Amino acid sequence: MRQPVINVELFGTPRVVAGTRRIEATGSHLGDILQSAVERAPTLRTHITDEQGTWLNPGYTFVVDGQFTNDPDTQVTAESDILLVARASGG
Amino acid sequence: MQSVHGRYLHIDVGTGRTCFYDLPDHVHQQYLGGIGLGTWLLYQWCPAGTEPFDPDAPLIFASSPFIGTGLTTASKLAVLARSPQTGFIGDSLTSSYLAISLKRAGFDALVITGVCDPWSTLILNNEAPTVTPAESLLGCSPDEVSSRLRQELGAGFRIASIGMGGENLVRFAGISNDGRLAGRTGLGAVMGSKRLKAIAIKGTGRLPTPAHPGELAAAAKTLSRRSLGPETAKYRELGTAANLAFFNKMSVLPSRNFQDSRMDGLDALHGEALHATHQTDKNACAACTIGCEHHYALRNSGDNGKTVRLEYESLYALGPLCGVNDPDIVLQASRMCDDLTLDSISTGATIAWAMECQDRGVDLGVPAPEIPSFGDGDALLRTIEQIAHREGIGDLLADGSRLAAEQTGQGSQAWALHVKGLELPGYDPRKLPTLALGLAVATRGACHNRSSAYEVDLSDQLSVDAAIQARVDAAIHAEDQATILDSLTLCKFLRHCFDDLPKEAAQLFNLVSGTEMTGDELLLSGSRINELKKRFNIEHGWTADDDWLPARVLDYREDSLLNPDWLREAIQCYYAARGWNPDGTVPIDSGQSLPSRIL
């Protein structure tokens, strides 16, 4: 089955490191989306993924349709509004 | 107890009289240090009836057992007084080498009362205090004061000082040291009321030894390593300015005096953009491994080569809150607040109140063109200067939005956005309900640093439709945890570096102090400190009406998660969970031991 193409909007360090505001990623779950995003912008990998490269490190989180989530199994569709951002811890 | 001196110094700067007082171990065990110790001292020295600018009103500087132990970020000084802005507890933290100097001078805290004549500098060369005239320093910025005093006294002195804002008793003036500001609640005005331009401290004594130096060194090394991990990358790489674009996207960025929660045309002001266009270098606070302080170039000030540190809160308050999106104006405004020692949140928010007055044709007692308008950057800069000098419209605004609105009337209280007189930070509570509760009940007013509950809302910790009790429990936990950090004097940016913050912080406290405290007992200390703050407020006139949010953020809006009924119920649950009475007062037998006044 063909995977949907979804825009992931980047904020903070991911935006600076990737050099772009948005990345087109494919997948039906957030875990796939992350892998697709780091394939398209490999410089992201060392900044945002864990040591195994399978999921986000503790400094980052996804926001899907306004809801914060750190679950790689979160389902997404082509209509999903996906943000990738550093976790909030002050300021 | 180890790692403390067990005594503090009181000095009356009017008479020059000094006295050392014992600090019993149980005070450190129950109130830890920093904000907790300072709260205990304020409770001792500022009984009911003491007005913020009274000669007898204390200005307190408190250190902590962690200072000088090698624990990263721990070189912080708590400054406390009865706030001239809120009338309640005024407490602020500042990271600086002054904290180490004070501790090496041989005491755990400094309590200042009295009024100098003429304007003076308090010089503490270890335990020997002198008060010397400082009239030649009047009008100088903190940088100039530091430079001149170090030239005069020697490089070993660390300096805290006030700028024009403090001299002119601006009710939201702060105290500057090492380029950092103890910014909120008007402590610089209290220092100004004592006609004290600067405090210079040189401490060359030995720091009190920790209980378990070997194990502590290993623990400090581990914490430093973790402080360089992904949990703090945001602060090291872009700083807190990175919040702006994301908050705008999430519609939690207050703009135009909270008339909206987002703003178009902010691209050049985003932290990511400033990083590319204006950033010059980075710095770290004293004894800190994180290094979150990002510096940016000033381009339109005429001060070639000068830079300014910029945090998200200054960016929000001097930018979108005033409808301003020019980065050079915002950076210049932030620099002015530093030089004039004005709290940038209250400065921006009070000017935003005046801007809305302009929009609505309200008479502020000055010619209409003198009233700033939303988006007018030049007017923003001019008004900041006027506030610090109490000139023109600045005299009204220098008292903060609450008092300015009370004096102005004409319905303007409706758009004075404050809690207990302290203006709101840059997190729109309409979509952040846990923070909304935290802001309403916080003892120092609308402060994100004392509540910290925004991290509940800006995470997957609770669902949008979470029960009220769950939000109350989360708000209390966030508040107590923030108090622990403020009292141990650890930076809040470290908090995700712990797997179990209370437990691991208690272990650090035990290694430092030689006590045997559990994580639960440490959390209880946080709760005890918050309760003593509340008792202080009650003694100084607090009523249940003070625990509330501005009407504007409670008015119906389609996307808002708040309404008055929800907030009322949440506050009742908060009081009950704290063990307080339904009217918010604290029963004598609340479970926390009420400290006796020993003075």
Image: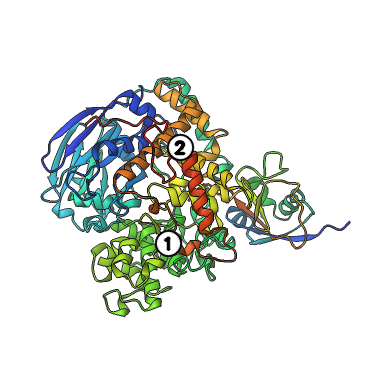
Q: Which residue is mark 2?
A: B579
Residue at 30% x, 51% y: name it: B87
Viewed as shown, does residue B573 lie left or right of B545?
Answer: right
Is A71 drawn above or below residue B33 in the view shown?
A: below
Residue at 47% x, 69% y: name it: B325
Q: Position of residue B348 (x, y in %)?
A: 38, 63
Residue at 46% x, 37% y: name it: B579
Residue B283 in view (yes/no): no
Is B118 drawn above or below residue B76 in the view shown?
A: below
| Kind of residue sitting beneath label 1 | Ala
Viewed as shown, does residue B192 lie left or right of B424?
Answer: left
Q: Which residue is mark 1?
A: B317
Q: Nearer the viewer, residue B384 or B136?
A: B384
- Whether callout 2 and callout 1 share a subunit is answered yes
> Which type of secondary structure does the marked residue at label 2 adopt?
loop
Q: Could you tell me which quadrant the C terminus of chain B lies in?
A: top left
Viewed as shown, does residue B169 lie left or right of B420?
Answer: left
Name the quadrant containing residue B97.
top left
Q: Position of residue B373 (x, y in %)?
A: 39, 75
Q: Nearer the viewer, residue B66 or B29?
A: B29
Q: Could you tell me which quadrant the N terminus of chain B lies in?
A: top left
| Kind of residue sitting beneath label 2 | Gly
Name the quadrant containing residue B40.
top left
Q: Chain of mark 2?
A: B
Residue B564 in view (yes/no): yes
Mark 1, other Cα within 10 Å: few <14 / some 14–19 / many ≥20: many
> Which type of secondary structure does the marked residue at label 1 adopt?
helix
Q: Chain of mark 1?
A: B
Mark 2 vs mark 1: give the one in front: 2
> Mark 2 vs mark 1: which is more N-terminal?
1
